[in-house]
Image (cartoon, rainbow, N blue to C red):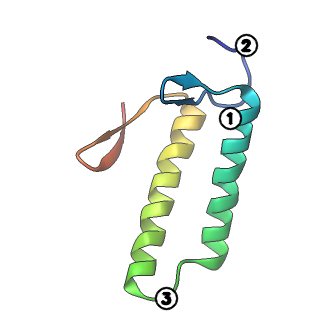
Amino acid sequence: MGQPWTSEPTITINGVEMPVSACMTLRMALETFAMHLSAEGLGGDKLGARLLSDYMDNIAVIRDAMHRRRDVQRLDGSWKMV
């Protein structure tokens, strides 16, 4: 089910390609979450710092995939571009 070209990424969930409006919603939700994490953090303890770092690392991988239009695959617990 191909979509016409758009500046929004193509997002497929459980084999279902999301419409452009859903892709925009997901992209905006990701960016809002990233801004909230950057502004508020997740607490000053080691666990909060670790979770914040992990979330931001994964957000960076997702952003890269969205902008490069390349697939992302999780291998052995770590995100890698393929």
Residue furthest out toward the left: 76
Is 68 situated above or below 48? above
Which residue is painted at 60% across and 35% down in the image?
A: 67
Tell whether 66 sits left or right of 75. right
List x then y, in percent, for residue 37.
Answer: 60, 69
Which residue is painted at 64% across and 78% down in the image?
A: 40
Decide which of tag 2 and tag 1 comes sooner along the chain. 2
C-alpha gap between disc 3 and disc 1 = 33 Å
Q: Which residue is mark 1?
A: 23
Residue type at mark 2: give it.
Pro
Q: Which residue is mark 3?
A: 44
Q: Which residue is mark 2?
A: 4
C-alpha gap between disc 2 and disc 1 = 13 Å
Which residue is painted at 23% across and 46% down in the image?
A: 76
The local secondary structure at tag 1 comes to helix
Q: Are marks 3 and 1 in contact (CB under 8 Å)?
A: no
Decide which of tag 2 and tag 3 comes sooner along the chain. 2
